[in-house]
Amino acid sequence: MTEALERAVVPPVSDADPFDHDILLDPEPLHQALREAGPVVYLSRYDVHALSRYEHVHAALLDWQHFESGAGAGLSNFRHEKPWRPPSLLLEADPPLHDAPRRVLREVLAPPALRGLREGWSAVAEETVDRVLAAGTEFDAFPALAEAFPLRAFPDVVGLGPDGRENLLPYGNMVFNAFGPRNDLVEADAPRLAGLSAWVNAQCQREALREGSFGAQIWAAADRGDLTYEQAPLVVRSVLSAGFDTTVHGLAACLYALAAHPVEWQRLRERPELARVAFDEAIRWQSPVQTFFRTATADVTVAGAVIPKGTKILMFLGAANRDPVRWHDPDRFDLTRDPSGHVGFGMGIHQCVGQHVARLEAEALLSALARRVEHLELAGTPRRHPNNTLRSWTCLPLRIRPVA
Ligand code: OVM
């Protein structure tokens, strides 16, 4: 026998359904079971292999040559099934096709391009916090802060007109459900699919986007020849798909974390410069984007197990972000740790291109809140909302004591 055959390992099998509502609402027990079962686990229900340990998720995300995205970042394999919408030029593409759209969007969303936003977003955050404080000391922070702030701050910057903005979150919710199997969550979105898609596609057109906006800058890249005119609206669509629900649920995760850990809230109040660490630690601890798929471009061996060419691999970002081999006391939300290296934004060539936007939004909202709120706690049981990919929220009751 060859050495490779001798070493081939048959991975353990699990019939768990990661897209079952109960598991979506409380994924940690499955994550722990998968991490402990082995580096590679075969999920018999979906005929996919799963990676859940930090080491292997991290390595696979970096190895785009063997773990491709062009066959789709969801369960559906675009080589065999027609995608539900034209594939994303960023998320659902590999080099070399991926590179021009990525370069353009990276420049538009780069830290220097965001410098001009800080002051305006601080004012929007102050105003958002003021409204909440004026209404009393108990409120639902999910609509009042986590949804309200990004929806007041970002659509203008993207260049959207005033009408139809209420479609943004339902569209994103649908996009993130669509990465999973065709289950009840996908069925529930079906009646709105055509209407939401038509609205989003219309907002991607040049005429719909305010002059000078991020959207207009994407179109200007086509004028320079950095993109084709066919690509420009699809790059705008990526911003509309991935730029709203992610930050809304990321901010909700962060507010939940801080309300549930009063000592960490005090730490943040004493050192407001910890706002960014608080956000990244919340992303690690909650992983708003829980999973993505890749597809094996060859028979790929991971820790001795062979993942057959052309099959899907489910990457558990949330499980990797709490792997005790990588993180000390991983279930603890802790502002004294260094959360960098978490895979909540992904890793490698597809790592979240909007992460600087998200961090700036978080910094604006958290610093405004830390300036005005002395004490923060949960005022009831927070409620989550099942989504095939997002760890999402619907209700986050908070009680606050304003600064005197
Ligand atoms: C896209 C897209 C959509 C959803 C998520 C995402 C997290 C990207 O359309 O490019 O990345």
Image (cartoon, grey):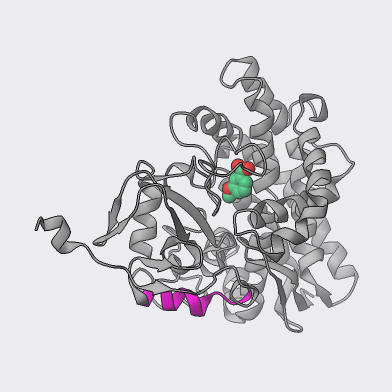
The residue nearer to you, when weighing 315 against 141, is 315
Would you identify the image quadrant in which residue 197 lies?
A: top right
Would you identify the image quadrant in which residue 218 lies?
A: top right
* 55 in relation to 34, above or below: above
Would you identify the image quadrant in which residue 374 lies?
A: bottom right
Identify the image quadrant of the N terminus.
Answer: bottom left
Identify the image quadrant of the C terminus.
Answer: bottom right
Residue 399 seen: yes
* 372 in relation to 101, above or below: below
Residue at the (50%, 33%) spot, across then down: 98
Residue at the (82%, 30%) spot, across then down: 208
Q: Position of residue 42 (x, y in %)?
A: 40, 66
> Is 333 situated left or right of 217 in this image?
left
> Is 321 situated left or right of 89 in this image?
left
Residue at the (66%, 77%) spot, across then down: 259
The residue nearer to you, when weighing 313 against 170, is 313
Q: Is 27 included in the stretch rendered in magenta? A: yes
How many marks are shown on the rendered structure?
Answer: 0
Range covered by the magenta-colored residues: 25-36
Q: Main secondary structure of the magenta part?
A: helix
Q: Position of residue 327 (x, y in %)?
A: 38, 71
> Is 155 situated left or right of 55 in this image?
right
Residue extending farthest to the top is 224
Residue 52 seen: no
Q: Is 362 included in the stretch rendered in magenta? A: no
Q: Position of residue 334 (x, y in %)?
A: 50, 73
* 148 in relation to 220, above or below: below
The residue nearer to you, when weighing 244 against 190, is 190
Q: Position of residue 51 (x, y in %)?
A: 40, 63
> Is 15 situated left or right of 160 in this image?
left
